[in-house]
Image (cartoon, rainbow, N blue to C red):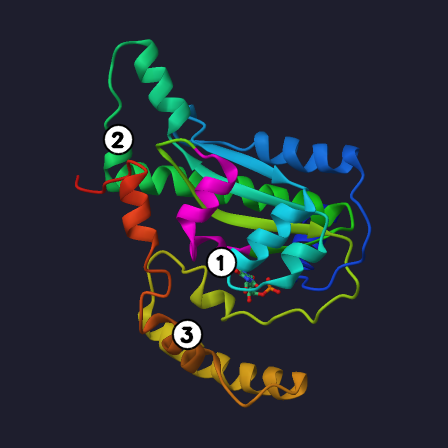
Amino acid sequence: MNQTITTIKNHRSIRQYKNKDIEPKDLNLILEAAHAMPTSIHGQQVSIVVVKDEDKRNKISDLAGGQPWIAAAPVFLVFVMDMNKTAQAGNKNNIPQIIHESAEGVLVSSFDAGIAMGAAIVAAESLGLGIVPIGGIRKNPQEMIDLLELPKNTFPIAGLVIGHPENLSAKKPRLSIESFAHSEKYNNELVTKAIDDFDKEMEIYYEKRGDKSSNWSAQIAGSYKQVYFPNVYPVLKSQGFILDK
Ligand SMILES: Cc1cc2nc3c(=O)[nH]c(=O)nc-3n(C[C@H](O)[C@H](O)[C@H](O)COP(=O)(O)O)c2cc1C
C-alpha cells in the first residue's frame, strides 16, 4: 500500500472543525488537484466557487437545511455543473449548444463535477484536513444560484466543507466489497446477502454510537420514499437543463 491509498482508505466525513484558517497554498493545491482531473470530451463542464466569506457560509448553512459545519469550517467549495463554458464555445463558432438540454448533458456535467470533487477530497485529506460533502445545497438551488451569481446552463450540484478537524469521527462501514466490485457480471443475489449482512453491522455501529436503533436499509428506504429535494427538477429546467432529449 502507498501513502495515497492509505489516505483514501482512511476517509471519514468530519462535522466538527477548529476555528482555524486553511493556508492559501494548501487551498491552491486542492483546487489544482481538482482542476487536473479528466473530463468528458475535454469539455471541462465543471467549475468550483470558493466561498470563504463568513456571512455567505452562514447563509449556505441555512439554505442547506441547517448544517452548522458549513459555517464552522473556513472554506466551502461549491461544485457546479457547468455547460456555460461549452455554450460559449458554441457561440464563438456560431453553433448553438443542444447537449445541455439532454439527459446526456446532465450526466456528463454531474459526472465531471463528481470526479473533481473526488480529487479535492483526496488532496484535502492528504494535507491532514477534514471534509464533508454537502448535497444539501440542492435543497434551495435557486437561492444558491442567486447567492453565487451562477449563469444559465450551470447548476450547483454539491458542496465540500474543508477545515481542520476538531476530532476524527469513526470510520463508517460499507456494503461488502463483493457487492460493490462485481466480477465479470452483476451479481444481484450477492447484493441481497450484502444488504442483510450490512444491516446487522450497521445496527451494531449505531448502537455503539448511542444512536436510536436503526439499520441501513430502513434508513435508506425512509429517505428514498420521497423526492427529498423537489426544487431540483424545476430549477435545473429553468437553468437550461430541460431534460427533454
Ligand atoms: C454527494 C454527497 C452529498 C452529501 N451531502 C451531505 C450533506 O448534505 N450533509 C452531510 O452532513 N453529509 C453529507 N454527505 C456525507 C455522507 O453522509 C457520508 O459520506 C456518508 O454518510 C458516509 O460517511 P463517511 O463519509 O464518513 O464515510 C454527502 C456525501 C456525498 C458523497
- The residue at 58%/30% (across/down) is 35
Q: Give neighbour class at mark 2: few <14, some 14-19, many 20+ (Cα, 10 Å).
A: some
Residue bearing mark 3: 220
Q: Disc 1 designates what residue?
A: 136
Quadrant position of residue 45: top left
Nearer to us in this view, 55 or 16:
55
- Residue at the spot 37% in from the left edge and 23% down from the top edge: 86
> Relative to 63, is 26 above or below?
above
For the question of whether residue 24 can be seen, the reply is: yes
Q: Is residue 135 magenta?
A: yes
Q: Which residue is mark 2?
A: 99
Amino acid type, mark 2: Ile
Q: Quadrant of residue 77?
A: top right
SS for callout 3? helix
Residue 193 versus residue 141: which sits nearer the camera? 141
Q: Which mark is residue 236?
A: none
State which mark lies toward you, 1 or 2.
1
Which of the two labelled residues, at mark 1 and mark 2, occupies the earlier sequence position?
2
Q: From mark 1 to mark 3, how far is it between C-alphas?
A: 16 Å
Decide: few, some or many residues near mark 3? Use Cα within 10 Å; few <14, some 14-19, many ≥20.
Answer: few
- Compare marks 1 and 3 and give the one earlier in the sequence: 1
Q: Position of residue 66 (x, y in %)?
A: 56, 64
Q: Nearer the viewer, mark 1 or mark 3?
A: 1
Query: Was residue 178 drawn as part of the magenta stretch in this picture?
Result: no
- What element does badge 1 sit on? helix
Mark 2 C-beta to ligand 1 under 8 Å: no
69 relative to 105, above or below: below
- Across and down, in percent, residue 43 comes to 41, 25
In front of the other: 29 or 101: 101
The type of residue carrying mark 1 is: Gly
Q: For the magenta stretch, what is the residue range?
A: 134-150
> As displayed, is residue 96 above or below residue 203?
above
